[in-house]
Image (cartoon, rainbow, N blue to C red):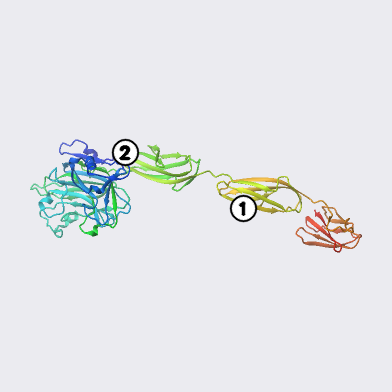
Amino acid sequence: MRKGILFKGALALCLLTNVIQAQESFSFDFEEYTGSYTNYSETKLKNDFTASKLKSIVGMNRASVGNKQLRGFFPKDKILGKDTGFRFERLLKPSNEGVLEYRVKFESGFQFAKGGKLPGLAGSNTATGRGVFGCNDNRDARKKAFSTRLMWREGGRLIYYPYAPLHSSYKNSSNDIPTEAKKRGQGRCGGDLTITTLSVNKWYTIKQYIKLNTFNANGTPKSNGIVKVWINGKLELSYTDFVLAGIRDVKVNGFAFHTYRGGSTNDWAASKNGYALFDDVKACTACTDVASAEVNVAPTVSLNKPANNSVYTLGETISLEATASDPNGNLDKVNYNINGGFYKTMTAAPFNTTFKPTEVGTYTILVKSFDTDGLTKQESVTITVKAPNRQPTVALTSPADGSVYELGETINLSANATDPDGNLEKVNYNVNGAFYRTIPNAPYNTIFKPTEAGTYTILVKSFDAEGLTKEEFVTITVNEPALSNNDFTKDTKIVEIKAFPSPAISTLNIVGIANDTSVSIISLNGKIVMREMMSKNKTQIEVSGLAKGLYFLKIENGSNPKRISFIKK
């Protein structure tokens, strides 16, 4: 609902004194009717629109007020003003010209069917009589009154539907009406001048201006009446050759607030209930000709930043940037609203500011431009503010820091990892600064088998989906195994067998063998890489060709084998 919107260059002049004609300006915006819809009784109507000025009140039981607007009800399977919508007429002081403006919106689901009436200006030859006459063939009656209502038709087509009186030379039959008159939309009763097409669930500002025709010296009307219609500030219909007044005494003296389904047959009815909303009703008589006056057009505005559906992190500063202009050069200000609450006003370009959310959630950013006459335009986007991403966790549960292992042992690597935001992506193991293995899912366990003695740094690192990491490491020691005589039996014949040196470079000495004995050298993976026959006279094995690493000697003596480990350097 917009308050204080003026007819630029027209309605404002209605407030000035005019010494030639009486004048009147009237407006009502329903602002006092907040909350849910309640019946718009005749009592309320008369209080708002001046009881002494009202005529022909019908169907107010189908009118309601609420949400700062007027609502009309159009029951299904009904036609005509007595059963659908409502109507009343409000008189104004007589004049040769007038302006009427109002806003209208057909609610979602409204069926236009074959058509229905919308408000328009009206006039007659008496200041206290009705300003609308019906469709009849009484020439005298048709000369003495007129109406310039609008009408919706199939598919939302909006037409100018004047009941314009015809000169006495015209015939009663529409087929006999001169072509020139038909071009002006005149027929036996009214006209059918297409203006535009309306959509449901969209507000339209409809403004019409009329100036009555003048007369020849003999009293016959001239075809020089003016009718103009603007929709949302755009001039959509303009004629300068209308005959509205059939006699000199006819004046613009009111507006017909009519809204109901038309027709006289059931095919004009809708198959379901419908509603239309009205607001910001304004009218004036004795207004200056607005045909040459500047028509105020709503300003423009475009929200450039942030983009719709953008995602931000709590703590970020969000840039709000908009461009706005006014076709009439009367841009007043630009407001930013956030989640329905006022945020900031900008009175000059660039219309840029910033916003730093203090809570996570969804935010609606709305920018609204205002011109100096109160017309507005707005645009909005929705953004999401999420909580800052938190670092994942990781804990290396095996091996323990400072652990000591013997070369050849398999070391278990295990870790626990979580992410407080539920976005854990993977866990990596590094050994001595080099990548070792990736584990994408729990359990984050693997094994590691050193090939050389020394000190090892085992590092585990967790990653979340946005790249945050956490790591932990331990240091372990891997020692070369001591030369040992690992007995598989208690056979005294081989318990004194020894091998040296360890580590060996080129030769390995074996002592303690009394008889010819088979000796095998076995790698860590259990493969026999060399086999020799040894005795008390042959005590050396050439091992220079072996790769570095840990090996085992398998010394066989019948059913009593012996195993000795050594390192090849």
Q: Nearer the viewer, residue 448 or 295?
A: 448
Question: Which is closer to the viewer, label 2 or label 1?
Answer: 1
Estimate the x, y position of residue 439 in percent, counting from the top left. Answer: 63, 53
Quarter of the view holding residue 525: bottom right
**Going 17% across and 37% down the picture, which residue do you hit?**
18
- Tell me if label 2 and label 1 are in contact, CB under 8 Å: no
Q: Secondary structure at mark 1?
A: loop
Estimate the x, y position of residue 239 in percent, counting from the top left. Answer: 21, 50
Residue named by callout 1: 442
- Residue 316's disc is none
For the view shown, which residue lies furthest in the left direction? 218
Q: Nearer the viewer, residue 397 or 545?
A: 397
Say left or right for 44 vs 220: right
Crowd tier of the residue under label 1, counting other residues whose Cα lies within 10 Å: few below 14, some 14–19, many 20 or above? few
Q: Amino acid at mark 1?
A: Ala
Estimate the x, y position of residue 496 in percent, counting from the top left. Answer: 89, 55
For the view shown, which residue lies furthest in the bottom direction? 558
Say left or right for 425 vs 380: right
Quote the CA–CA distance across marks 2 and 1. 65 Å
Estimate the x, y position of residue 296 in percent, counting from the top left. Answer: 28, 43
Say left or right for 445 vs 490: left
Q: Earlier in the sequence, mark 2 or mark 1?
A: 2
Residue 14 seen anywhere in this rendered image of the structure: yes
Crowd tier of the residue under label 2, counting other residues whose Cα lies within 10 Å: few below 14, some 14–19, many 20 or above? some
Quick one: quadrant of the N terminus?
top left
Q: Secondary structure at mark 2?
A: loop
Residue named by callout 2: 372
Q: Report the label total.
A: 2
Q: Amino acid at mark 2?
A: Thr
Q: Nearer the viewer, residue 236 or 145?
A: 145
Residue 434 seen anywhere in this rendered image of the structure: no
